[in-house]
């Protein structure tokens, strides 16, 4: 772990079930390869994860089973380790490549910016040669304009210890926001291609489908149907990502899917037993033992307490030299990038979804009332009434009371988005835009725009608010059956994930006290420089560039025929820099003293 990482807190644990074939999965790490430096339960870094994987490989070899490592994309954007350098990822790509990943694919974040997509092609694909799969993704070579597969479409291999024959595929969901040097083919179209149809007819013991794809979305439904239609009995293991949640799905008794959260908080564990090795002469005794198939999952909290527990090692026996070297390289990179440089001191915790919006502890209330109200001002138009709209997905993480560093800035706001505007929009029309963005999904569908894409991806995993029960008082512990659910949360448990998935509620490796999750709107709005009495005739409609397509569609719906040519820059600086300046100015206190 990093020298400044807080020590993990001991907690009740569930062991990892082992099978013939086992997996460790990372997804949506978004550059958090230094681990969480303000949260003890997620404080292990990429070097620790390397030690963990190496120790688990030793154990797998010892008991004669297999272990494969998976990463399902969105490795970049979201942490100073990637975003804080120029060019971005100057240190992060070299750190990430140190993990020995067996099957890896692309996320949407690798493709938003043309330079990031180019780095994916020139750095990450060669770093994981033969393991990087791009079943529905092409790259356009800048030198020739030629469209070529980003990486190989599939991989067929046999596992080391068990001799299981695997056919692996690697997908990205039907993403449309990619830069113009890549082509994402809709999954349904890829399924029709000859190479795919041939691949799913290969004689293998297991299909492995990894993807930056949510487990319950249309893409995996289509892939499941296609593979199952040709292979009625072959096990299929899916690994997904994108929505930042812990999730496990059962498609049928031999087809399951795992998704391991976000931001290096969670390492996914999957174990499969009872795989029939069609190409091998089986020992009848072993066959009997493995008569029925099992698919078991765990969500591992990324911290050293858990890593020691799962490997039965300790502080001195757990780390490998390789892992320690990578932790040291991360520390060196963080120093070079001055990520601990203090911008200010956050006066209180500000939550994305742990506090309701609006409220005193809502990050979005703070953004709306304090930050936008200040930074969404163009000196030349400062007296013009304006509505400023910001999508909640543009903010990526909570702010904890205390030190706010250069790193925190990228953690909260990693994107290179800018504020832009349409001048002199009739107020009556402009005033209808926010409610449409928040409530009128179907009107955007015709333009192939999805309003849920405006909100943080975590929202996809929750249908309604989850309000964590208060920790029980001594009295309530003895209050009878009505209090039964409360009895499950002990005052000693650390707050954290309490996941419910298709297999029940015993997936988390660490027993946690639950955390509240409040739904938030897709967008928020600051109303600035309004006349004291009555409504203005017109306003400047200011918004963050990412949401321009939605804004234009909403305006068209209320009868205003604006197009992209009417949109002008409102502030020159990227929003992240405006935010950093606001913090330097308004949270000046040094709380390290
Ligand atoms: N410039 C950007 C890019 C993305 N977003 C938000 O992020 C969401 C995607 O997040 P994932 O980590 O799941 O890929 C996207 O839907 C937007 O809400 C943004 O605001 N600005």
Image: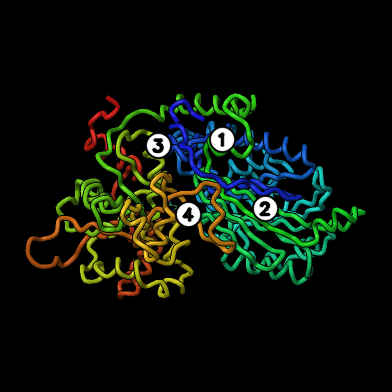
Residue 294 falls left or right of residue 92: right
Does the numbered disc 1 mark a residue whose Cβ is under 8 Å from ligand 1?
no
Q: Which residue is mark 1?
A: 46
Residue 38 - label:
3
**First along the sequence among labels 2 and 4:** 2
Of the two numbered discs 2 and 3 in the rendering, the one whose residue sits closer to the viewer: 3
The image quadrant where one finds ligand 1 is bottom left
Q: CA distance from mark 1 to mark 4?
A: 24 Å
**The C terminus appears in which quarter of the rendering?**
top left
Q: Marks 2 and 1: which is nearer the front?
A: 1
Marks 3/1: CA distance? 16 Å
Mark 2 near mark 4, Cβ–Cβ under 8 Å?
no
Question: Nearer the observer, disc 1 or disc 4?
Answer: 4
In primary-sequence order, the first of circles 3 and 1 is 3
Q: Earlier in the sequence, mark 1 or mark 4?
A: 1
The answer to whether residue 181 of the structure is visible from this angle is no
- Which element carries disc 3, helix, strand or loop? loop
The residue sitting at 27% across, 30% down in the picture is 591
Decide which of tag 2 and tag 1 comes sooner along the chain: 1
Q: Which residue is mark 4?
A: 498
Q: Nearer the viewer, mark 3 or mark 1?
A: 3
Q: Give the residue at mark 2.
A: 134
């Amino acid at each position: 772990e990093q020298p400044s990482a807080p020590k993990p807190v001991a907690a009740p644990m569930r062991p990892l079930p082992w099978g013939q074939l086992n997996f460790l999965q990372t997804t949506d790490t978004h550059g958090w390869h230094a681990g969480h430096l303000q949260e003890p339960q997620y404080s292990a870094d990429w070097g620790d994860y390397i030690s963990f994987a190496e120790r688990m490989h030793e154990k797998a070899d010892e008991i004669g089973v297999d272990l494969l490592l998976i990463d399902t994309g969105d490795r970049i954007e979201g942490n100073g380790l990637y975003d804080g350098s120029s060019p971005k990822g100057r240190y992060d790509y070299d750190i990430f490549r140190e993990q020995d990943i067996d099957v890896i694919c692309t996320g949407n974040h690798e493709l938003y910016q043309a330079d990031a997509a180019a780095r994916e092609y020139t750095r990450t694909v060669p770093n994981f040669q033969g393991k990087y799969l791009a079943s529905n993704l092409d790259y356009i070579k800048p030198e020739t304009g030629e469209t070529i597969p980003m990486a190989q479409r599939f991989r067929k291999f046999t596992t080391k210890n068990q001799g299981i024959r695997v056919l692996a595929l690697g997908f990205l969901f039907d993403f449309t926001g990619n830069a113009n040097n890549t082509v994402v083919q809709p999954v349904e179209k890829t399924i029709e291609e000859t190479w795919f149809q041939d691949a799913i007819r290969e004689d293998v013991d297991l299909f492995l489908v990894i993807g930056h794809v949510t487990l319950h979305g249309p893409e995996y439904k289509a892939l499941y149907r296609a593979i199952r239609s040709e292979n009625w009995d072959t096990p299929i293991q899916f690994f997904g990502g994108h929505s930042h949640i812990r999730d496990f799905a059962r498609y049928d008794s031999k087809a399951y899917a795992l998704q391991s959260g976000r931001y290096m908080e969670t390492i996914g564990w999957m174990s499969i037993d009872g795989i029939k090795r069609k190409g091998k002469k089986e020992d009848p005794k072993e066959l009997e033992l493995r008569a029925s198939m099992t698919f078991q999952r765990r969500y591992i909290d990324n911290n050293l307490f858990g890593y020691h527990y799962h490997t039965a090692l300790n502080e001195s026996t757990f780390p490998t030299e390789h892992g320690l070297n990578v932790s040291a390289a991360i520390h060196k990179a963080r120093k070079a990038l001055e990520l601990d440089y203090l911008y200010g001191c956050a006066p209180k915790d500000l939550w994305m979804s742990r506090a309701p919006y609006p409220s005193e502890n809502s990050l979005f209330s703070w953004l709306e009332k304090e930050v936008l109200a200040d930074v969404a001002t163009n000196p030349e138009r400062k007296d013009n009434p304006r509505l400023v709209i910001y999508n909640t997905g543009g903010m990526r993480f909570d702010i904890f009371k205390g030190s706010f560093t250069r790193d925190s800035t990228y953690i909260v706001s990693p994107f290179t988005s800018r504020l832009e505007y349409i001048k002199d929009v009739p107020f009556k029309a402009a005033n209808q835009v926010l409610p449409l963005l928040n409530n009128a999904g179907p009107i955007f569908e015709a333009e192939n725009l999805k309003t849920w894409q405006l909100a943080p991806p975590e929202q996809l995993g929750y249908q309604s608010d989850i309000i964590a029960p208060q920790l029980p008082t001594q009295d309530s512990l003895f209050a009878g059956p009505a209090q039964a659910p409360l009895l499950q949360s002990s005052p000693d448990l650390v707050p954290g994930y309490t996941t419910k998935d298709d297999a029940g509620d015993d997936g988390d490796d660490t027993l946690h006290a639950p955390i509240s999750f409040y739904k938030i709107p897709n967008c928020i709005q600051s109303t600035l420089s309004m006349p004291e009495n009555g409504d203005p005739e017109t306003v400047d409609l200011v918004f963050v560039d990412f949401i321009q397509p939605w804004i234009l569609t909403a305006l068209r719906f209320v009868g205003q025929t604006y197009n992209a040519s009417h949109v002008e820059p409102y502030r020159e600086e990227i929003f992240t820099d405006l935010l950093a300046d606001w913090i330097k100015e308004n949270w000046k206190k040094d709380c390290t003293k």
